[in-house]
Image (spheres, coloured by chain):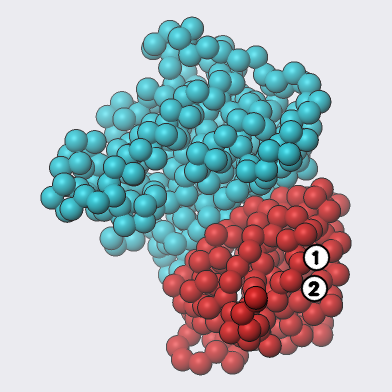
Chain colours: A red, B cyan
């Protein structure tokens, strides 16, 4: 029998390419059960999903070729709790600037992003962030060839860096330009596990 | 360890820390990094789903054939490839040639491969990689070599294999050697670990980190001889984090199709049905080379220490 949902939600981690193992570790330390998502049937019975960092072009193409893009879009638009980091944010965004010409992601998050908007790898950086609703000290933001949020529609901006939105929330979607899974700080993963369980 | 590459700018952001250097390698995991020699190749690689490309003038198979001194590529070529794609672009410098590395950093390249595929510039010393803001990947044949490169500041490791052969046997040998080296550490006490460090020429601190983690402390890809989807999946099942494919793609009959298949095989490396599907009808693979047929002094993996 399945354990009560509220205690240990089952969270899928999209595992096309990228830093998915790091999310699995952070989620399990935060009290969730996890499942790697590599095929449409892996979406069955999930309480939440993480779209990790990696290369958004690679992830999008593999999802398209494996028939995962459409069922994933359906699941998220029907309210599946979603945490997207970096490339995951690009995959979710309504508008992508500087992507490949035919890069069509999920288009569910009401923001416009510019790929590598903070520059190339030599411009990757770490910065302390104040995140709305997250108690205690500032959060260590690790930005790696990060997307720049250039426009926001009906989303709540929950963190900024130099005035630019770097974390947004829209319903049951949380999307970040940075990588909490590369830090030891589990606060955002714990909040997400709570959201998925609710 | 004090970070010699990190710099703080006016708005409280720190660039070039070891965290962001290793972080990019973590984003490349589960992916395929493809050698490209023209912007057109780079676009094909990106379209196929490569997670990064390696910009160079000649693929290893041609370097091997043509001989002579192989050096860093022309900055114009590298720039044109950087302009052609949005995925990360890597480039190679010669072992020990820190000025080529400085030039690549000035070009804004995303990763530098201090590579045995080029002719070494220094037979004693590799580059001190810590002061650079740009991260480095370096080759290894076993755990000792991997840990020495990490001590010098490599943010990513790749097993060397034997580049330009289309023969996966050396890649397998080197991946297995790293795995065996790490397995051997389990259960050693500190005195035994120090002795092992002496025997394999490993820095004790890095070796202790390998023991604690049960793996290398940085991302480890396989390289050198991968030519088919099955080769890529083999390396993934041996535990590497991703693969480099050099000559294997653009020396084959249908590069786009083969590149797509190798990308899929790297994601679905443990699903034989999917591997069967993507391996079918790819046309001719690159011509392969038997390792014993290569004169000893032409073995690329023996360069560096």
Task: State which quarter of the image contains the N terminus of chain B.
Answer: bottom left
Location of mark 2 (residue): A76
Q: Is residue B174 above or below residue A125?
A: above
Task: Return the x and y of residue B128 as percentages of the image width and height.
Answer: 33, 44
Which residue does the image show at 56% across and 66% down from the upper left?
Answer: A23
Which residue does the image show at 32% across and 39% down from the upper left?
Answer: B181
Q: CA distance from mark 2 to mark 1?
A: 6 Å
Query: Is residue A97 visible to the viewer in this orientation of the structure?
Result: no
Task: Return the x and y of residue B38 as percentages of the image width and height.
Answer: 70, 31
Residue projecting furthest to the front: A1
Q: Chain of mark 2?
A: A
Assess whether mark 1 and mark 2 are in contact (beta carbons under 8 angstroms).
Answer: yes
Task: Return the x and y of residue A155 as percentages of the image width and height.
Answer: 77, 84
Discs 2 and 1 share one subunit: yes
Q: In screen coordinates, is B257 left or right of B1?
A: right
Location of mark 1 (residue): A72
Q: Quadrant of residue B286?
A: top right
Task: Return the x and y of residue B293 as percentages of the image width and height.
Answer: 49, 7
Q: Quadrant of residue A130?
A: bottom right
Camera-nearest residue between B266 and A31: A31
Q: Residues within 10 Å of mark 1 (few under 14, many from 20)?
A: some
Q: In screen coordinates, is B29 left or right of A72?
A: left
Q: In screen coordinates, is B62 left or right of B261?
A: left
Q: Quadrant of residue B73?
A: top right
Task: State which quarter of the image contains the C terminus of chain B.
Answer: top left
Label 1 sits on a secondary structure element that is helix
Q: Chain of mark 1?
A: A
Which residue does the image show at 50% across and 43% down from the upper left?
Answer: B239
Which residue does the image show at 64% across and 60% down from the upper left?
Answer: A36
Q: Is residue A93 above or below residue A104?
A: below
């Amino acid at each position: 029998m399945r354990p009560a949902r509220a205690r240990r939600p089952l969270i899928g981690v999209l595992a096309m390419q990228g830093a998915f193992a790091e999310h699995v570790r952070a989620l399990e330390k935060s009290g969730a059960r996890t499942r790697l998502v590599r095929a449409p049937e892996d979406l069955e019975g999930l309480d939440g999903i993480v779209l990790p960092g990696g290369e958004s072009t690679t992830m999008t193409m593999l999802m398209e070729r494996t028939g995962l893009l459409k069922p994933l879009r359906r699941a998220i638009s029907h309210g599946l709790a979603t945490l997207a980091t970096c490339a995951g944010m690009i995959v979710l965004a309504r508008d992508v600037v500087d992507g490949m010409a035919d890069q069509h992601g999920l288009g569910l998050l009401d923001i416009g992003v510019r790929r590598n908007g903070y520059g190339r790898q030599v411009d990757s950086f770490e910065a302390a962030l104040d995140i709305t609703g997250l108690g205690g000290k500032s959060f260590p933001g690790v930005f790696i060839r990060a997307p720049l949020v250039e426009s926001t529609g009906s989303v709540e901006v929950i963190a900024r860096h130099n005035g630019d939105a770097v974390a947004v929330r829209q319903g049951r979607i949380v999307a970040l330009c940075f990588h909490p899974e590369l830090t030891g700080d589990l606060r955002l993963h714990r909040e997400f596990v709570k959201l998925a369980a609710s | 360890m004090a970070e010699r590459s990190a710099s703080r700018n006016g708005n409280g952001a720190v660039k070039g820390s070891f965290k962001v250097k290793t972080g990019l390698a973590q984003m490349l995991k589960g992916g395929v990094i493809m050698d490209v020699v023209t912007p057109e190749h780079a676009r094909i690689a990106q379209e196929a789903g490569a997670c990064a490309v390696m910009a160079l003038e000649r693929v290893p198979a041609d370097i091997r054939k043509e001989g002579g001194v192989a050096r860093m590529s022309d900055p114009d070529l590298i720039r044109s490839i950087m302009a052609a794609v949005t995925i990360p672009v890597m480039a190679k410098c010669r072992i020990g040639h820190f000025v080529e590395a400085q030039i690549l950093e000035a070009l804004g390249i995303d990763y530098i491969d201090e590579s045995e595929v080029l002719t070494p510039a220094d037979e004693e010393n590799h580059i001190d990689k810590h002061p650079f803001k740009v991260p480095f990947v370096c080759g290894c044949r076993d755990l000792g070599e991997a840990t020495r490169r990490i001590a010098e500041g490599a943010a990513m490791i790749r097993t060397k294999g034997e580049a330009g052969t289309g023969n996966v046997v050396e890649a397998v040998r080197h991946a297995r050697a790293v795995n065996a080296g790490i397995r051997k550490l389990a259960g050693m006490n500190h005195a035994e670990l120090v002795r092992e460090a002496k025997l394999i020429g490993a820095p004790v601190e890095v070796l202790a980190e390998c023991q604690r983690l049960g793996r290398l402390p940085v991302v480890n890809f396989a390289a050198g001889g991968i030519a088919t989807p099955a080769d890529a999946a083999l390396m993934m099942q041996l535990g590497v984090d991703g693969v480099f494919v050099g000559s294997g793609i653009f020396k084959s009959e249908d590069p786009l199709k083969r590149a797509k298949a190798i990308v899929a095989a790297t994601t679905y490396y443990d699903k034989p049905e999917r591997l069967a599907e993507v391996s079918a009808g790819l046309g001719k693979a690159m011509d392969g080379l038997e390792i014993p047929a290569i004169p000893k002094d032409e073995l690329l993996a023996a360069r560096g220490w």
